[in-house]
Image: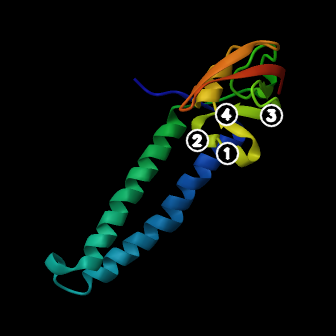
Amino acid sequence: MANISYYTQEGLDKLRNEVKQLQTVERPKISQQIAEARDKGDLSENAEYDAAKEAQGLLEARIAKLEDLIANGRLIDESQIDTSKVYILSKVKIKHLKLKKDFEYTLVAENEADIKLGKISIESPIGKGLVGKEIGDIADVETPNGVVQFEVLGISR
């Protein structure tokens, strides 16, 4: 069964652009490296040829994985997001109860996560702990250092 993932338009475009870059720029580069290595003669002891063929295999695997993600990706209609509970694409303001510190995150798909931009994966411990919570709820988040409690202060798009 296919593994369905949900993406923003930005996230889906990023995947498509990466595939295009790999197919139109990286693939021809590696093909050129293979051709140059092949021209050097005996392939049985040609380290450059072996390295280029290995790089080609890794590149093709990456392209196949990205194409699979795109094929099984679903675009999220941000206008339909319910802000009464935390879901994917919710912007959530939370308070770390022990530290008494507020944080604001947007829950996104795994490969769109970027903590510097305040985007955390819905698959992360915090993301999993927050899904389905409402304003005022306490989320118990399992971390390597034990359970951490967060209070949901706000939910928006």
Q: Is residue 28 left or right of residue 53?
A: right
Find residue 44 and report its image quarter. Answer: bottom left
Q: Is label 4 in a helix, a strand or a loop?
A: strand
Q: Is residue 69 left or right of residue 58?
A: right
Where in the figure is residue 95, as x and y percent of width and height?
80, 26
Q: Residue furthest bottom?
A: 40
User: Given the image, on which type of amino acid does mark 1 rest?
Assistant: Asp
User: Given the image, on which type of amino acid does mark 4 rest?
Assistant: Val
Dot 1 corresponds to which residue?
Answer: 114
Dot 3 corresponds to which residue?
Answer: 104
> How many other residues sit within 10 Å of disc 3, few (<14), some (14-19) or many (≥20)?
some
Nearer mark to the viewer, of 1 and 3 = 3
Q: Identify the residue at horizontal 76%, vertical 14% (top origin).
A: 85
Q: Identify the residue at horizontal 79%, vertical 20% (top origin).
A: 152
Q: Is residue 98 left or right of residue 125?
A: right
Question: Disc 2 versus disc 4: distance between alpha carbons?
Answer: 8 Å
Question: Disc 1 versus disc 3: distance between alpha carbons?
Answer: 13 Å
**Residue 108: image tag:** 4
2 shown above or below 140:
below
**Residue 111: image tag:** 2
Question: Disc 3 versus disc 2: distance between alpha carbons?
Answer: 19 Å
